[in-house]
Amino acid sequence: MDNEKMLRHVLRNNYEDVLNQIFEECYHDIVAYMTDTFRAKNHDYGSSTRDVYKDFKDSYMVRISDKYNRVRNLMKIGEENSQVTDEKLQDTILDMANYCVLWLSNILYDKRMYEDMNEDEREADQVENDLKLDEAVEIKAKDGTWKI
């Protein structure tokens, strides 16, 4: 490989590394923003999403579907043609992502609460009927793997 080809190869690889780093920073910024939004809304609304989930297990699916329909419509008509001006495409996508994370958090919370109950409490609460404990989802964390 001559010097010019080698230099192009090194520059291209370094450029891709920089682009990946920028993308990862964007991802972390979004997750941090979602966490801040979650905390603020939880402060203002309390545990309303968790409370509704207890009564209606499909409540998150309804909210996510609403956000999905808004995204689909905004992409169809164009954000600039939307009559609702205080919720942009980016806001709707973030809301949908937050609802997905909240839903998964509720599933994990319910499973942990179930595991901490004794047999009598489990029977009384009937949590067993609401959870599909045998269908664990693995979530990889930097410090290992945990299941929900």
Image: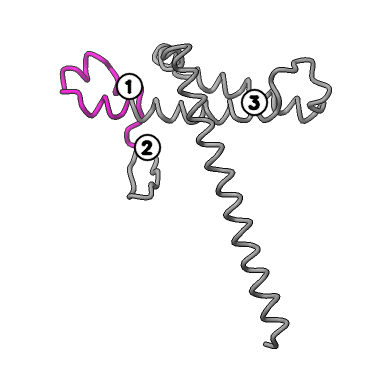
Q: Is residue 17 left or right of residue 107?
A: right
Q: Secondary structure at mark 3?
A: helix
Residue ID at (48%, 24%): 38
* Region in magenta: 110-134
- Which mark is drawn over residue 2? none
Relative height, residue 129 to residue 133 (above, below): above
Q: What type is the residue that disc 3 sits on?
A: Thr
Residue 122, given in percent of the width and then of the height, sits at 22, 20
Q: Amino acid at mark 1?
A: Asn
CB atoms at circles 1 and 3 under 8 Å apart? no
Name the one closer to the observer, 67 or 131. Answer: 67
Q: Quadrant of the N terminus?
A: bottom right
Q: Name the residue beneath numbered marker 2.
A: 135
Q: Quadrant of residue 146?
A: top left
Q: For the residue carrying disc 3, how many other residues have a C-alpha within 10 Å: few (<14), some (14-19), or many (20+)?
A: some
Is residue 100 located in the magenta-colored stretch of the structure? no
Amino acid type at mark 2: Glu
Q: How is the image coloured?
A: one colour
SS at mark 1? helix
Magenta stretch containing residue 116, yes or no?
yes
| Residue 14 spot, x, y in % from top left | 62, 66
Q: Residues within 10 Å of mark 2 (few under 14, many from 20)?
A: few
Q: Earlier in the sequence, mark 2 or mark 3?
A: 3
Q: Position of residue 29 (x, y in %)?
A: 55, 39
Q: What's the residue at 41%, 11% (across, down)?
A: 55
Question: In this figure, which residue is indicated by the disc labeled 1?
Answer: 129
Q: Which mark is residue 92?
A: 3
Label 2 or label 1, whichever comes before in sequence order: 1
The vertical placement of 31 against 88, above or below, is below
Q: Nearer the viewer, mark 2 or mark 3?
A: 3
